[in-house]
Image: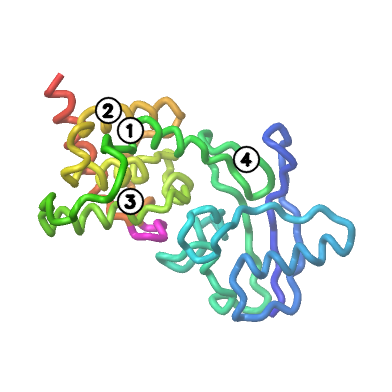
Amino acid sequence: MNLILKVWRQKNAADPGRFVTYQARDINEHMSFLEMLDVVNEDLIARGEDPIAFDSDCREGICGTCGFMINGIAHGPQRATTVCQLHMRHFKDGDELVLEPWRAAAFPVIKDLVVDRSAFDRIIQAGGYISVNTGSAPEANTIPVPKEHAERALDAAACIGCGACVAACPNASAMLFTAAKVAHLNLLPQGQPERFRRVRNMVAQHDAEGFGHCTNHGECEAVCPKQISLNFIALLNRELLRSALRG
């Protein structure tokens, strides 16, 4: 399989950046998208050129490190799939693919397809924790959790913080990410002590980082590789309202 890649190349945050065209030749259809880029980079290095910078770690769809736009779609055309788990068999010989980084003011480009997502870390630091005593794990059955709450908390906790929701949103909002991180703690008994302070602080940090507001376009849910539901944003809004009413 041979492909044409139009890749966004940018040396650093101050560089204006530009698209550069590359040929990806003799690509095996069983390769992952990142393995295809590894092959392209090996060719670039052999020619003495700077390889394409992109993030990756686990390459198993777990860590959320990978992620960029492929033909204008966050993580590419396959639903519920990270870039590292996207395989070349979903493309055709001769396809032209446009690769560019997440586009959001809160995600400044570091180099090429790599962006700085530390804004997510600061949202977590603002309230994504619980106050518990350290030591041995308590007996699980001592804190009863309704099955519905447990399942919803686990659904929210599936968020890997890849940033696709921000990249897809026309407002560059990170409300789906923030809502998931609020919900998976607020739904559990252990998360109750900081419940209202958590939602206030995390939403305030979200806004301070320069993310936009949610206007219910639903693009975030559509591209989320873990299929985090838009319903969590509704839950966040209810929690924020309750927090405001408590004063």
Q: Position of residue 187 (x, y in %)?
A: 19, 46
Residue 2 falls left or right of residue 80: right
The residue stretch that appears in magenta: 222-227
Give the percent coordinates (x, y) of residue 221: 34, 54
Contact (CB < 8 A) between labels 4 and 3?
A: no
Left or right? Give the position of 40 relative to 34. right
Q: Do the residues labelled 1 and 2 touch (CB within 8 Å)?
A: yes
Circle nearer the N terminus (4, 1): 4
Closest to the observer: 28 or 58?
A: 58
Front: mark 1 or 3: 1
Outermost residue toward the top in this view: 247
The amino acid type, in three-letter code, at marker 3 is Gly
Cα separation, mark 2 vs mark 3, equals 23 Å
Quadrant of the drawing holding the N terminus? bottom right
Question: Of the residues tagged 2 and 3, which is closer to the observer?
Answer: 2
Residue on which disc 1 sits: 127
| Distance (Cα) linking label 4 and label 2 | 28 Å
User: What residue do we see at 61% from left, 51% from top?
Assistant: 100
As drawn, 190 above or below 125:
below
Q: Which mark is residue 200?
A: 2
Residue 218 is tagged as 3
Q: Are marks 2 and 3 in contact (CB under 8 Å)?
A: no
Report x, y in % for residue 89.
56, 79
Q: Quadrant of residue 172?
A: top left
How packed mark 1 is, by other alpha carbons closer than 10 Å (few <14, some 14-19, many 20 or more), is many
Looking at the picture, which amino acid does disc 1 mark? Gly
The numbered mark, 1 or 3, whose residue comes first in the sequence reads 1
- Image depth: mark 4 or mark 3 in front: 4
